[in-house]
């Protein structure tokens, strides 16, 4: 029976990876000798831009035939997986049927036990940002080197190579290693890399131990994917400066937050001009600015994270009268100067409550705001809404609490939204499931038509599938 099962698993691997090889071969660049990593010709500006509605630790990596993932949201190492839409099967992204997937140099799926920060599907390849080397105090390793790098994997799981190194240092004292947060650390600030017009923009941070002497560097590094060439964008002088986070790029502009030295609640927002290589701090609001429009006073929600379109910055606020909380508002600011544009601010028909709480991967708050291909997207712990830039509601869809098993008084819910291929994705992580996040989707057009309903897409899994995990848990329960 065991031999039959092994033969069955190997057969599935060969069939699925054969399909992936055909997909990959169609995308090969013949002018570069047919190499799977042959670079496409053309200007960097012709390459895809950052998609701010689909990046970060839980970015959806979808193709016509399936989805890729980098590992469980609370995982401790890279675990590239492929989910086939037609068969419903999932495999580790490695084209070697005999591989045990134990983190060696031959396994693409678990390559070198990289501590993954995040992964993105870009221009036909999987790009992985992570750390490798002597990452754990007391780990049995002959090398003391720790590296933060970008790797590129073929979509058929046949090969992985290093694009470039962001930072490398020797952990000679075998100390605890601190790196940016992402998949590895779960709910912290979004310190994931993004890809924009052929370049990776990478928040980085490396420290050994806790003292200043162990600080190896931090900031934002720009890396050309075609060559691995790097260029410093932001440099942290001290670890107390805070790691840049929540990166987004449009055209010639890179936006990012950086925690303040004083440890205040509001994170300063910065605008980086890619062509001019200049940095500008944007003050979206202070007590001296008149926040009255539409006949009402408004307050800025400093605990929420702003979002961006091509030439505008949007942030959440709320209207108020005397001691009442009022309704939610979306505040519009000039993307170049940070000045409030009152005529473009939106008063919504959604009540605001100070007491409501929700844990979000985008911000430690119960509300999340991001751009969408048609305007803006806003979600709380119960409903997600689409608006155009004039404030017209295009559609809404409720969180399927019963479907997800969410109880009435459950707080600190991990609900993350992404938009990919004209579909809204909802990622829900339930700790009772061991961190095996559940991913649902719904076509946006159906939401606009008022008939949208979520369907299960796949689960974000690690080395062990969710089914195998449940089998093990049931055995322990006996």
Image: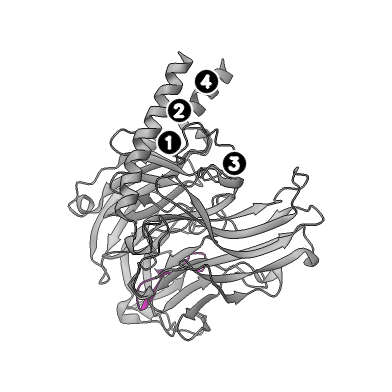
Q: Residue at x 39, y 51 (%)?
A: 60
Q: Which mark's residue is nearer the viewer, 2 or 3?
A: 3
Local packing at callout 4 (Cα closer than 10 Å; few below 14, some 14-19, many 20+) is few
Local packing at callout 2 (Cα closer than 10 Å; few below 14, some 14-19, many 20+) is few
Is residue 139 or residue 243 the one in the foreground? Answer: 139
Q: Residue 294's x, y, as percent?
A: 31, 77
Q: Secondary structure at mark 1?
A: strand
Marks 1/2: CA distance?
13 Å
Pointers 2 and 3 in contact (C-beta within 8 Å):
no
Local packing at callout 3 (Cα closer than 10 Å; few below 14, some 14-19, many 20+) is some
Task: Note whether residue 408 is visible.
Answer: yes
Image quadrant in which the N terminus is located: top left
Q: Secondary structure at mark 4?
A: helix
Marks 2/4: CA distance?
11 Å
The residue stretch that appears in magenta: 302-320
Q: Which residue is denoted by mark 4 in the rendering? A: 474
Q: Which residue is denoted by mark 3 in the rendering? A: 103
Q: Which residue is denoted by mark 1 in the rendering? A: 91
């Amino acid at each position: 029976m065991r031999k039959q099962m092994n033969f069955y698993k190997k057969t599935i691997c060969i069939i699925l990876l054969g399909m992936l090889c055909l997909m990959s071969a169609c995308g090969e660049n013949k002018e570069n000798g047919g190499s799977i990593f042959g670079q496409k010709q053309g200007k960097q500006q012709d390459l895809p831009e950052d998609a701010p509605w689909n990046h970060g630790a839980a970015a959806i990596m979808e193709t016509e035939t399936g989805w890729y993932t980098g590992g469980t949201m609370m995982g401790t190492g890279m675990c590239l997986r492929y989910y086939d839409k037609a068969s419903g099967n999932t495999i580790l992204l490695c084209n070697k049927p005999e591989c045990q997937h134990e983190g060696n140099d031959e396994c693409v799926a678990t390559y070198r036990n990289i501590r993954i920060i995040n992964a993105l599907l870009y221009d036909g390849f999987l790009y992985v940002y992570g750390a490798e080397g002597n990452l754990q105090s007391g780990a049995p390793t002959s090398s003391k080197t720790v590296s933060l790098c970008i790797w590129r994997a073929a979509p058929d799981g046949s090969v992985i190579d290093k694009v470039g190194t962001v930072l490398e240092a020797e952990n000679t004292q075998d100390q605890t290693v601190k790196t940016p947060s992402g998949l590895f650390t779960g709910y912290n600030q979004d310190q994931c890399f993004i890809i924009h017009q052929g370049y990776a923009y990478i928040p980085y941070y490396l420290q050994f131990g806790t003292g200043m002497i162990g600080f190896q560097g931090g900031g934002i590094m720009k890396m050309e994917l075609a060559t691995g060439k790097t260029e410093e964008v932001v440099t942290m002088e001290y670890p107390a400066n805070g790691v840049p986070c929540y990166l987004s790029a449009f055209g010639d502009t890179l936006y990012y937050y950086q925690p303040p030295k004083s440890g205040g609640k509001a994170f300063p927002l910065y605008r980086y001009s890619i062509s001019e290589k200049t940095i500008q701090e944007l003050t979206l609001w202070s007590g001296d600015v008149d926040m009255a429009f539409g006949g009402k006073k408004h307050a800025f929600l400093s605990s929420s994270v702003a979002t961006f379109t091509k030439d505008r910055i949007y942030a959440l606020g709320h209207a108020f009268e005397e001691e009442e909380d009022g309704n939610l508002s979306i505040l519009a600011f000039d993307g170049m100067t940070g000045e409030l544009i009152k005529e473009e601010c939106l008063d919504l028909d959604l009540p605001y409550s100070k007491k409501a709480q929700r844990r979000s991967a985008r911000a430690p708050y119960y509300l999340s705001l991001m751009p969408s291909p048609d305007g803006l997207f806003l979600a709380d712990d119960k409903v997600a809404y689409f608006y155009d830039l004039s404030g017209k509601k295009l559609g809404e869809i409720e969180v399927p609490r019963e479907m997800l098993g969410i109880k009435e008084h459950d707080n600190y819910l991990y609900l993350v939204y992404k938009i990919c291929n004209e579909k809204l994705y909802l990622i829900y992580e339930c700790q009772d499931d061991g961190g095996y996040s559940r991913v649902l989707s719904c076509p946006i057009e159906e939401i606009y038509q008022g008939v949208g309903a979520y369907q299960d897409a796949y689960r974000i899994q690690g080395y062990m599938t969710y089914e195998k995990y449940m089998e093990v848990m049931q055995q322990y329960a006996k």
